[in-house]
Structure formats: structure tokens, C-alpha cells
Amino acid sequence: DVKVTQSSRYLVKRTGEKVFLECVQDMDHENMFWYRQDPGLGLRLIYFSYDVKMKEKGDIPEGYSVSREKKERFSLILESASTNQTSMYLCASSFLITEAFFGQGTRLTVV
Amino acid sequence: AQRVTQPEKLLSVFKGAPVELKCNYSYSGSPELFWYVQYSRQRLQLLLRHISRESIKGFTADLNKGETSFHLKKPFAQEEDSAMYYCALRRTQGAQKLVFGQGTRLTINP
């Protein structure tokens, strides 16, 4: 069974803080993704990574960066959190013909 | 560019009625399309993918390249089908970028 684990279910941060969201997968998948999920807007791709240290911007990368130093771990970084980054963040992983497997989500509130 | 559009944010039907959730896409290459579902308090999970051509939980979806659509259908809705449904497109050229539509919340009324 593929496991995609996000480090926190709920997170509350202050405006201007640097925030790290962590995601780990245990199936040696090449591809990893970060999305934000907002009502009415669906899942919007922030960044994805197709190999260690390789990344590509998604549709809404502004205000975010990512890090993939090891294959199993993909971190999303909010350089200076703002209230409009309050959202549900979903991590996923996939490999070649497999479907994407999702984590349980991190609900981030920026106050 | 790859893009997925789900025109209906909300869809409400009665139990036993047919259901159709619409999905349109734009992609210059040959697409790989999926439907994902998220039940209440559960993770997003795959429902079906166009290459498998199978029916899952009574749902089917046909890829129509001429109309660039991948609508999800079920002839007789059940209450347990109430969920959030997302259509997704995976790029088949280069890195496997996966993008989703805006989602449709399906409610099945008893």
C-alpha cells in the first residue's frame, strides 16, 4: 500500500513567518506534487518535482518554493506567509503509469 | 498548456436518477485523463482512468477527442456517491505534470 504522509494535519502560523510543509512517500515514486485546494477553485498545482532536485512550476507558484533533496521527501516552503495562503494543502506522488496517491492534507491557517 | 474545466460546481440529483459530471480539457498532445473522488473526511483517491476502460462503482467515462471531453456517467445514482469529484489530465510528453479541474460537488438526495 502506497503511503503519502504529510507532517501536519493542522497548522496555524503568523503573517510573515516562514512555513515548511513536509511530505514523505514510501514507494520510490519519481513524481511528487504540491496542490492547494480551495472551494470553487479545485486543486491548483503549486509545484511538482520529477526527480531529486528537479522541479517545475505549476499554475500558482508565487509566494512558494520547494525542496527535494531526497527522493522520498518533498517540502513546500512559504517564504513569508500571508493570509491569502490560508488553505488546504495536498501532497501527491506518482510514477510512470501509476495514478497519483495523495496525502491526508494540511490545513494551514495564517493569522 | 494543459487545462481542465469542470463547468458545474454543484450537482444535485435524486437517488436512482442518472448522473453526468462534465469535464472538458485542452492539451496539444495525446492526453491521459482521470477522475478522482474525495468522500467526506477521506483522502482524494482515483475513481477511474481512461486507459483502463473499466467501470468502477457503476461509473464510466469515455474520452471524446473530437469534443475534448471526458464526462463521468452513472445510470442510477446511489446515496453513497455523494462526494467531490475532480477530473484530471496528465501530460504525456516530458515530465508527467498532473493538473485538475475545479471539481464538482455531487449530492444524491434520498
Image (spheres, coloured by chain):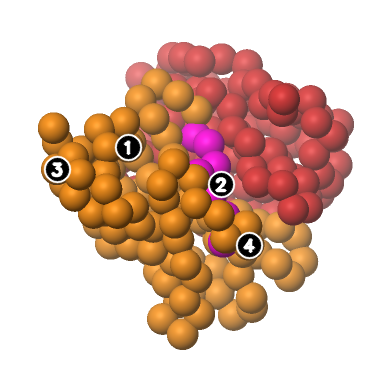
Type of amino acid at the residue the image marks with label 3: Phe
The residue under label 2 is: A46
User: Residue A40: x and y, percent?
Assistant: 29, 46
Callout 2: residue from which chain? Answer: A
Circle number at residue B81: 1
Q: Judge from the rendering whether residue B88 lies leftward or rightward of residue B23; answer left or right.
A: right
Q: CA distance from mark 1 to mark 3?
A: 11 Å
The residue under label 3 is: B14
Q: CA distance from mark 3 to mark 2?
A: 36 Å
The residue under label 4 is: B51
Q: Judge from the rendering whether residue B91 lies leftward or rightward of residue B60; answer left or right.
A: right
Q: Residue furthest bottom?
A: B66
Q: Which contiguous range is marked in magenta?
A: B44-50
- Location of residue A82 by image quarter: top left
User: Residue B4: x and y, percent?
Assistant: 44, 63
- In this picture, is A103 found above or below B12? above
Type of amino acid at the residue the image marks with label 1: Asp
- The reply to the same-chain question for discs 4 and 3 is yes
Callout 3: residue from which chain? Answer: B
Circle number at residue A2: none
Mark 1 and mark 3 lie on one chain; the one further toward the N terminus is: 3
Q: Is residue B75 located in the magenta-colored stretch of the structure?
A: no
